[in-house]
Image: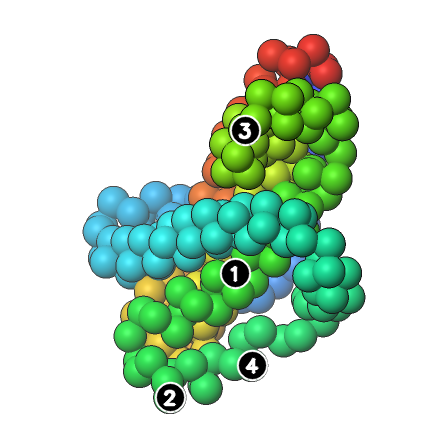
Amino acid sequence: MRLVVVLRLLVIAGLIGLVEMLCRMGVIDNFTMPPPSRIGADLWRLLASGKFNGAIGKTLSNAALAFFLAVSIGMLAGVVIHRIASIRAALDPFFATYYAVPVLAFYPLLIILFGLGDAPKIIIAFMLGVVAVIVNTLNGLDRVPKVLLKTARMARMGWFETANKITLPSAAPFVLTGVKFAVAYALIGIIGSEFILSTEGVGFEIAFAYNNFDNATMYPLILLVMTVSITVNMLLGMWEKRLLQRRGLR
């Protein structure tokens, strides 16, 4: 496993080094994109100045709320849908084509319904993340060993107790895949919404910097978003590996 981590870090370092070299050699114009080393230094400067602390806090708090709603409601919906075959059969085609729908296109409608506050952004991020959690929860529940379900029936466990103690723990690796997707979708939904019409948040600051050719602000904020997403997903990945190791699957 350590070899995998080392190889992953080498790939990342290689890509960063390649981009750095291309920027330094002028193959990539510095006006278009500064070298990664400069982007990292600019990010440190922005964080140290505290200028964007409010925007960062707003974006991350909204993304965290959307993530929590997507995971909790998605897992519950997945359990209920899995138990009712007719609903599962009716919804499966919609799940298969859901991400072909441009969810961000509903943002102006949500602004009309809920105003210019945080609610439209959170709803967009929730809509993007919840289906990934539902689909992966269903996939995990489909693979729960039958013997565990028979044991639950013999113990006369109710559906909620069965889901809480038997099926969801057994389906956890698949559910965690949906959770990792929800992290990315929550950030995409919040930042994409801020990019369109919002007047605050990291997405707004990136859009403002883009429109004003302020690469010293735009690229560091993009790097910050990438770093947060990668870090959270790596932590979830470590949790997933420990879970699988406890079950003797790795």
Q: Disc 3 marks which amino acid?
A: Met
Mark 2 and mark 1 lie on one chain; the one further toward the N terminus is 2
Which quadrant of the rendered structure holds the N terminus?
top right
**Disc 2 or 4, which lies upstream in sequence?**
4
Which label's residue is closer to the chain start, 3 or 4?
4
Using the image, tell me which numbered label, if any, was put on residue 105. 4
Residue 188: x and y in percent read 52, 61
- Residue 157 is tagged as 3
**Residue at the image position 43 percent from the left and 68 percent from the top:** 123
Residue 112 shows which numbered tag? Answer: 2
Mark 4 to mark 1 CA distance (whole Å): 14 Å
Residue at the disc numbered 1: 188
Between disc 2 and disc 4, the foreground one is 2
Helix, strand or loop under label 4: helix
* Alpha-carbon span between mark 2 and mark 4: 13 Å
Give x and y (percent) for residue 179. 55, 43
- Look at 56% across and 62% down and name the residue there: 128
